[in-house]
Image (cartoon, rainbow, N blue to C red):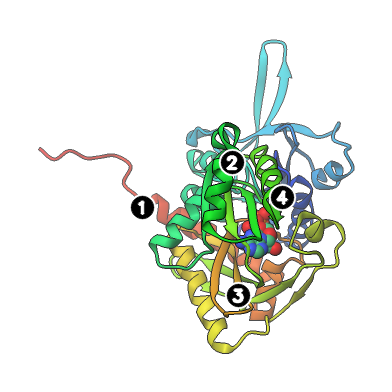
Amino acid sequence: MAAKKLRMAVLFGGRSGEHEVSLMSARSVLSVLDPARYDVYQVGITQEGTWLTGENACDLMENGDTKNLTHCTILPDPSRSGLYGMQITENGLSLEMITALDVVFPVLHGTYGEDGTIQGLLELADLAYIGAGVTGSSVGMDKSVFKDVMRANNIPTVESVIILRSDIKKNIEEVIRRAEGMSAYPLFVKPANLGSSVGISKCNNRSDLGEGLMDAAAYDRRVLVERGVDAHEIEVSVLGNDMPIASVPGEVLPSREFYSYESKYIDGTSRLLIPAPLSPEIAAEIRQMAVHAYVAIDCCGMARIDFFVEKATENIYLNEINTIPGFTSISMYPKLWEATGLSYVELVDRLVELARERKVDRDLTERHFRRTK
Ligand SMILES: Nc1ncnc2c1ncn2[C@@H]1O[C@H](COP(=O)(O)OP(=O)(O)O)[C@@H](O)[C@H]1O
Ligand SMILES: [Mg+2]
């Protein structure tokens, strides 16, 4: 007898600066899901946060043609978990179940996708889902808290200071003095919680720094200032739950002065070197650090972990973790697995298995404190 098909919701789009990137990732994922094994439900989330479903939701959303899509939602009540169609009625809303779900794949990057918020909903709904849980996602998203956890685990990160928007507003001279006291220029300024290089600037002098601080503070209430390192940018893919494994490392050669938003998505000329031309010792150390970092923030499913290898010293610094990395067939995350021996199709299947295994594990957890007399 053929195995039962898995009912899978693929979530994409979302209320984040990486909405378009998410549609590209989702398009690749959807193109490899074997219809003999999966019943796929496409769920597009608009920039405003409205959930829409329909057969070709991804295409329609890319074309901005969403009028024939059905409003939908997932409820937090585990006794009603599944995908619901939603009609707007005179008295409010009426819901009708479209399908129960065996697994959810949030292909959502950045805010409200990669930061633990959607994961929180899926936990409440008691659904199996791909990728990190609430803690791994939110710690992975916050560059400052993430660095503190790395430091507590003796994983090297570039020197940095964290600054509040209110301090920038109150006394920017004092903030600049603190940043300059930490390191000489160049300095990098970044919002604590964002991705895709949005709000990030490289500052070569005090006037750049003033501007960079104001710019980053527009995107977040906490801003990170880091020593700028002249480094190779090395990335590693990690996969697994309790026994994660790391891929071969790859190197990004940004097309511009740094790996900016334009360099990542607009001019399309940044190059990937796979595997990265590193000594076997450094490659092994990076792989080991990647797994250590993954475990330290309680990641599961997948993550891409990015490093700097300083050119002058060969010092390794862990830069950041992406718990829902770019997932098009030419993105670094799947490319690194391909180079390590796992094809794109196998990777997606493995992620589904990991999501289901974690749900089984989660269900073992005792939810009620049983008082013994
Ligand atoms: N401390 C730093 N030194 C040198 N380059 C940096 C530093 N921090 C960031 N960059 C550059 O900016 C890019 C984006 O920064 P990153 O911290 O990875 O944020 P994002 O989450 O937006 O990708 C990096 O890929 C790198 O090119
Ligand atoms: Mg990055």
Q: Are the residues at dot 2 and dot 3 in contact (C-beta closer than 8 Å)?
A: no
The crowding category of the residue bearing disc 3, from other C-alpha atoms within 10 Å (few below 14, some 14 to 19, many at least 20), is many
Identify which amino acid the numbered label 3 is placed on.
Val
Name the foreground residue: 360 vs 121: 121
Instruction: Give the distance between the C-alpha atoms of the residues marked 1 and 4, in whole angstroms.
Output: 53 Å
Q: Secondary structure at mark 2?
A: helix
Which of marks 3 and 4 precedes in the sequence?
4
Residue under numbered circle 2: 173
Which of marks 3 and 2 precedes in the sequence?
2
Which of marks 2 and 4 precedes in the sequence?
2
Q: Are the residues at dot 1 and dot 4 in contact (C-beta closer than 8 Å)?
A: no
| Residue 81 drawn at (x, y percent) | 54, 38
Using residue 313 as the reference point, say whether residue 274 is left or right of it. Answer: right
Identify which amino acid the numbered label 1 is placed on.
Leu
Instruction: Give the distance between the C-alpha atoms of the residues marked 1 and 3, in whole angstroms.
Output: 41 Å
Disc 1 or disc 3, which is closer to the eye? 3
Residue under numbered circle 4: 208
Q: Secondary structure at mark 4?
A: helix
Disc 4 or disc 2, which is closer to the eye? 2
